[in-house]
Image (cartoon, rainbow, N blue to C red):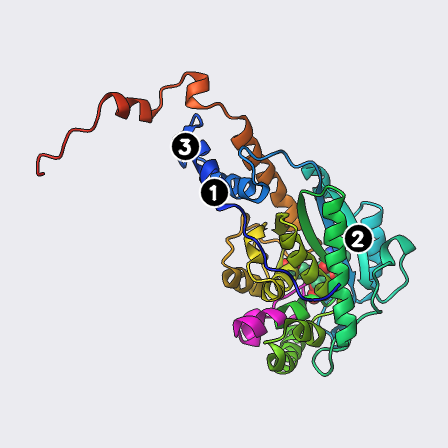
Amino acid sequence: MSTEFPPVVPPDETVLREAEARHAVLTKPVGSLGRLEELGNWIAACQGSVPPKPFVRPRVVVFAGDHGITAQGVSAFPSEVTGQMVANFMTGGAAVNVLAQVAGATVRVVDMAVDADTPAGVSQHKVRRSSGSIDREDALTREQCELAIAAGRALADEEVDAGADVLVAGDMGIGNTTPAAVLIASLTGSEPVAVVGRGTGIDDQAWMRKTAAIRDALRRARLVISDPVALLATASGADIAAMAGFLAQAAVRKTPVVLDGVVVGAAAVVAEEMAPGAREWWVAGHQSAEPAHAIALGHLNLKPLLEFEMRLGEGSGAVLALPLLISAVKVLAEMATFESAGVTNREDLTREEPAPEDPAE
Ligand SMILES: Cc1cc2ncn([C@H]3O[C@H](COP(=O)(O)O)[C@@H](O)[C@H]3O)c2cc1C
Ligand SMILES: O=C(O)c1cccnc1
């Protein structure tokens, strides 16, 4: 599969208007459910159906991979944790597994570049172990990068073909907030100090090392910002490149996505470059505590559903927001209308008593 994406068709504007009209006749003052109404209208437009249908298969795909930059002391944890956490996802013990249960979502983990052996069931798309240290060398070769993007696309296709009707991408990879910050800074013209964050909880010494690493990687990344595949090869990793392919392909497949935190946000910023308009198929589940995330969401013109000061990744913030989407669908599908419930609507009154004419006219 190539890294060229077909044009993205936006969610159906006509259906969006129909959903707005339906909200106007449900038994509540117009607009009184605030952003829950907007969310329901967007889901209806994505599905091309008013009322929208309940989600039958919310699906989380966690993209795991290690990062060579970790050797520069940019994380509070060692790379070994990535492989250990892959095992934890598989036995259902990670935060995203627990939160997914609440939302009725299922979780799949894929090893794109973990620096350890993982079971065959999760490593079929593995491109390599870890990545180059992006402050001094490319993360991936162009070929590895294209393979990773293609794997992400294939995963989106596979999930949509298996019935997934809302998707979440999650990340697991020690050190991954460093490439995420570099990608976001490069495409938004931001400075290293504006995008550097505490990640897993680094101390001030590590913060200085991380800022220097971001500065050096950004110098390299800025040379290739006009070519998103080259940018991913220079400054991401196979996990993030696959995520970008996944997010872009979800849009091509007209499947809504709930975005997570800064790492998924970085992949999203690049995916929007690869497949312009893909962002219309995404909603921001939350805004992470990582400073680069607000910059990424602003760039994509996406307003987060939750601001919960979360900074975990794994898709956890997106999955926490999923019940909002489920509620938005249910409201449009199941609330009574003024007519069906026999409740007097403001419209009925204005029809009976037309507004007096303006005496000034
Ligand atoms: C136990 C554990 C579980 C995690 N789940 C997600 N992350 C998150 O934290 C890491 C990114 O932060 P940094 O760039 O500072 O390394 C990634 O692994 C990310 O997925 C975790 C981190 C740890 C330690
Ligand atoms: O916002 C995120 O996705 C995030 C933040 C810190 C560590 N890992 C992920």
- Looking at the picture, which amino acid does disc 1 mark? Thr
The percent position of residue 40, horizontal first and vertical second, equals 52, 39
Q: Alpha-carbon distance for marks 1 and 3? A: 16 Å
What residue did someone put label 2 on?
A: 109
The percent position of residue 99, horizontal first and vertical second, equals 70, 43
Question: Is 37 or 213 nearer to us in this picture?
Answer: 37
Query: Which label belongs to residue 14?
Result: 1
Q: Locate ligand 1 by image quadrant.
A: bottom right
Q: Alpha-carbon distance for marks 2 and 1? A: 37 Å
In this picture, which residue range is highlighted in magenta? 183-203
Q: Nearer the viewer, mark 1 or mark 3?
A: 1
The percent position of residue 201, horizontal first and vertical second, equals 67, 63
Q: Is residue 200 magenta?
A: yes
The residue at label 3 has a CB less than 8 Å from ligand 2:
no
Q: Alpha-carbon distance for marks 3 and 2? A: 41 Å
Q: Earlier in the sequence, mark 2 or mark 1?
A: 1
What residue did someone put label 3 on?
A: 24
Q: Earlier in the sequence, mark 3 or mark 2?
A: 3
- Per the image, label 2 sits on a secondary structure element best described as strand
Q: Residues within 10 Å of mark 3 (few under 14, many from 20)?
A: some
The percent position of residue 93, horizontal first and vertical second, equals 80, 46
Question: Is 293 or 52 nearer to us in this picture?
Answer: 52
- Per the image, label 3 sits on a secondary structure element best described as helix
Q: Nearer the viewer, mark 2 or mark 1?
A: 1
Query: Residue 33's image quarter?
Result: top left
Q: Earlier in the sequence, mark 1 or mark 3?
A: 1
Relative to residue 283, is residue 301 depicted above or below?
below
Quadrant (top left, top right, bottom left, bottom right) of the C terminus: top left
